[in-house]
Image (cartoon, rainbow, N blue to C red):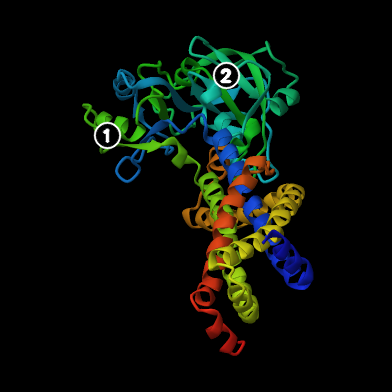
Amino acid sequence: MFKNAFKYVTRKSAKSMILFLVVVIMSSLCLVGLSIKDATNKASNTSLGSITNSFTMEINRQVNFGTPRGAGNVKGKDIEKICSSKDIDSYVKRINSVADLVDHDIILTSNENEERLTKFKSTVMLTGVNESKKETKFVSGAYKLVEGKHLNSKDKHQILMHKDLAAKNHLKVGDKLLLRSNIYDADNEKGADETVEVTIKGLFDGHNQGGVAAAQELYENNLITDLDTAAKVYGNTEKTAVYQDATFFVKGNKDLDQVIKNLRKLDINWNAYVLVKSTSNYPALQKSISGLYSVANKMFIGSLIFAGIVVTLLLLMWMNARRKEIAILMALGISKTKIFIQFVLELCMVTIPAYIFAYFIASKTASGLGTKVLNNVSAGVAKQIAKESASNQLGGGAEVDGFNKMLTHIDAHVEPKYIVYVIIFMSIVMLVALVVATTHLLNKNCKELMNEEEV
């Protein structure tokens, strides 16, 4: 049987080559699809790994409009109630405020309003936080610490400054400067006129991805501070201040959905707040990940289906042309089982080299194809986000840029285990195709086959 199978494959070289090429192309696409899917999974874990088991407490803007400037007004006591839950491992809470640099300059844009400059010429945005490395803008990658250390809950009157703002004012890590309350800020409801001396603990980098309406939306004019500093410029303390939001990290063995459900039973005015899974704060990232998964799945499943259809049609035509050959083999006393095994051997002689060839082709092309797929998916998501941003009239700044964060790189490469998966699934498809193509012939006797006209 092996000898006969080998003779047929080599004698019918054109047919064998067609089948070989179909299996090579489809197997290569399957391998690339698996490599893109695995690379997407790794990139997803890297991008979302620190926030997949966390949720954020925000104001419900349908009924709670926040501060006069539109910032959050989450009550500190409500944050503490959630923190007291045994399911919460840690948390990050943020205060948004505004202050002026004393005797230092901010970075201005080219389209500053003269009237606005009289009130906010040296004004910077403050984000007070108890643990800066888990602050949204650092998690999203909009900000990146380049010098010094992150802020922690023990820090007081410490800041992280953008490296370009520091360079403009000839400042470095360890230097001190003064921040003063801005009496024109709408959120300074107490009319506070406080001055706070702060020390630069670290420098960060990052630049706006889109346009801005005011200088304060520039990354460069944002300071990350400890909670006490951000509260004090409004005449508050950590206890009396209102918070932009709070992110809670759930213990690893707890189900996030169940924890959120249980927390809603706490004595908190839930009409004023919403609890949002932290992954939901990165819709563009989620869309880009989903898009890549979709393309990878379509490549894998589509290749299997296409291969099954094409190979079935080819085998149907070729087997019909072998009616008399099959009849002669039957007349010689060769069982139908042995005849079918010969067909299987013929298929193996073509497909096994095809699998090996496909592995090397996919290994060379996976990275490039993965990048092209990522670029196409990202372009589609970017257009969709741009339309949504325009309709929602979103502004600029690091919060919005973090909201629009997408995957920028995937490392797609073919691992040896992928070829095992492809061989298993593709072989099943080939076997089914062979059964479909030969069943109607092997169910007949040699006389019937000899008398039938070839189709």
Where residue 342 appears, as percent x and y from the top left, is 63, 63
| Vertical comparison of 223 with 357: above or below | above
Which quarter of the picture shows residue 352?
bottom right
User: Could you tell me if residue 217 is visible in this image?
Assistant: yes
The answer to whether marks 2 and 1 mark residues whose Cβ atoms lie closer than 8 Å is no
Assign the N terminus to one quadrant of the image: bottom right
Q: Nearer the viewer, mark 2 or mark 1?
A: 1
Residue 395 pos. (x, y %):
54, 46
Q: Position of residue 300 (x, y in %)?
A: 58, 56
Kindly identify the amino acid type of the residue bearing the numbered disc 2.
Leu
Secondary structure category for the residue under label 1? helix
- Mark 2 residue element: strand
> Which of the two discs, 2 and 1, labels the residue nearer the N terminus?
2
- Please give the name of the residue rendered at 54% of the width and 68% of the height, measured from the top-left corner: 336
Residue 215's disc is none
| Foreground residue among 118 and 71 | 71
Q: Position of residue 318 (x, y in %)?
A: 65, 76
Q: Which residue is mark 2?
A: 179
Badge 2, how many Cα within 10 Å: few under 14, some, many 20+?
many
Whether residue 386 is visible here, answered yes or no, is no
Are there few (<14), some (14-19), or many (20+) residues within 10 Å of tag 1?
Answer: few
Q: Which residue is mark 1?
A: 261
